[in-house]
Amino acid sequence: MSDIKIVPMIGKAFGATATGVDLKNLSDGEFNDLHAAFLEHGFLLLPGQHLNEQESTAFGQRFGELEFGGAPMANQKKHEDGSFGKIHDLQSQIMRTNVGNEAWHTDSTYKPIASKVAMLSAVVVPDEGGQTELADLQSGYDTLDQATREKVAELSAYHSTNFSQANDLGDFPDAEGDGVYGEVYHGEAYLRPMVKIHPETGKPNLFVGRHAFGIPGLTREESRNLIRSLVEHVVADDSRVYSHNWVAGDTLLWDNRRALHRARPYDYSKPRYLIGTRVAGDPASELAYYPEDPEAEAGRRALTEELGFLREETKDRMYGATTASF
C-alpha cells in the first residue's frame, strides 16, 4: 500500500504537495498514484528528493520520451568533472535566454512537438529571489466570460522564441546558431490553437504565453492585445498563481499542457544550480508540423514580418535590439 500523501495547495485552484515518496526508488504503483495526482492538480511539489542529474533523467523517462534529461540549469559553466566555473556574463546568450524565461511561457511550443511534462530539482539556490512561478491555464479558461470563450474558440497563434526574445528583451538571437541555440532559435514559427483540450483529462485550457504571436485573421494590434489580455487574465487572480521559494532538494513537476511558468529575478552574480528534465509531448496531441511540411512556410513568413517590426520597436528594451556575440 502506498504511503504517498497528496495535499492540495491552500487557497489555490491547482497544485499539490506530495510527501511519503522517494523518486529514486519508486514502485510502479506509486508512480501511477503520482501520475494521477499530477493530472488532477497540474503540478506537484516533492520536497527533500535531492535528485542528481542521472536520477532526474530516470524519473522523467517514466513519463515518456525525453527532450532532454538531467540538464544543468545554472548561471555558471559546468566542467566535465562536475565542478562549476565562473558565472556567465549577463550579455551572453545563455543569460539572455535565462532572463527571457522570466516571462510567462509554456515549454517547447516553439518546436514541432511541444512538451508535456517539465521538472526542476534544486541543488544550489540564492538567498533571495530566483523563485519559480506557475499559473493555471485550466482555471484561466474556466473563468473567461462567454464572449471571450467564443472569440478564442477557433483561433490559433504562432509560437517562436525568436519572437519572444525580441519582443520581451530586445534580444535577437542568431537563428543560424549551433548547439542548443540552434535548437531554440531556429527561425521557425509553429501554429497552435489558443484553446487546448488536454489529451489526458479532456478539459479545455487556454494555450498562450510569451512565445505566442500573429493570430491569423486578426490585425497585428488585435493579436497582440488579445494575447496580452489572456495572459493577464490567467495571472490576475492569486488562486491561479503559485510562487515557489526553492529549498535545496526540492523537485517541482508540472504539466506544460495546463500550466504557464516563469523564473523570477535574483542576484545574477550569485550561484544558482537547478537540474532540468523535460518530457516530449505525444505527437498525436502535441505535433504542430515539421519544418519540411508545407504549413511551415506561412510561419516563417509571419515571423520574418514580425521581427521586422520589432527591430524598430525594441531598441529601448534590455538588450537594445542586439545579438549576443558570445
Image (cartoon, rainbow, N blue to C red):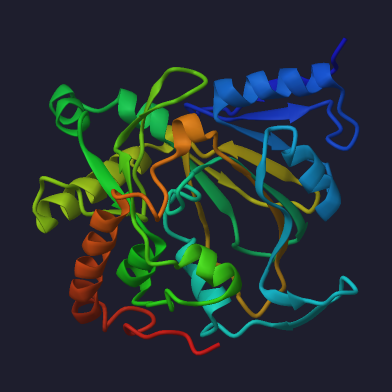
Q: Nearer the viewer, residue 225 or 302?
A: 302
Give the left or right position of residue 210, taking residue 226 as reference: right
Q: Which of the image's four quarters has the N terminus?
A: top right
Left or right, residue 289 beside residue 195: right
Location of residue 131 with respect to 287 vertically, above or below:
below
Residue 177: where, in percent of width, then height?
50, 77
Residue 123 in picture, x, y percent from top left:
79, 58
Whether 294 is drawn above or below 59: the answer is below
What residue is shown at x 55% (from left), y 83% (from top)? 92
The answer to which image quadrant residue 175 occupies is: bottom left
Q: Quadrant of the C terminus?
A: bottom right
Residue located at (82% from left, 20% from top):
28
Rendered view: 202 above or below 120: above
Q: Residue at x 22, y 60 (%)?
A: 302
Looking at the picture, how far across and down is residue 49, in whole percent?
83, 42
**Which is more toward the observer, 110 or 93?**
110
Left or right: where does residue 168 sit relative to residue 105?
left
Say above or below: 42 vs 178: above
State how many labels appear.
Answer: 0
**Residue drawn where x is 83% and y is 35% of the image:** 23
Determine which quarter of the picture holds residue 4. Answer: top right
Outermost residue, top direction? 1
Report if residue 281 is visible in the image: yes
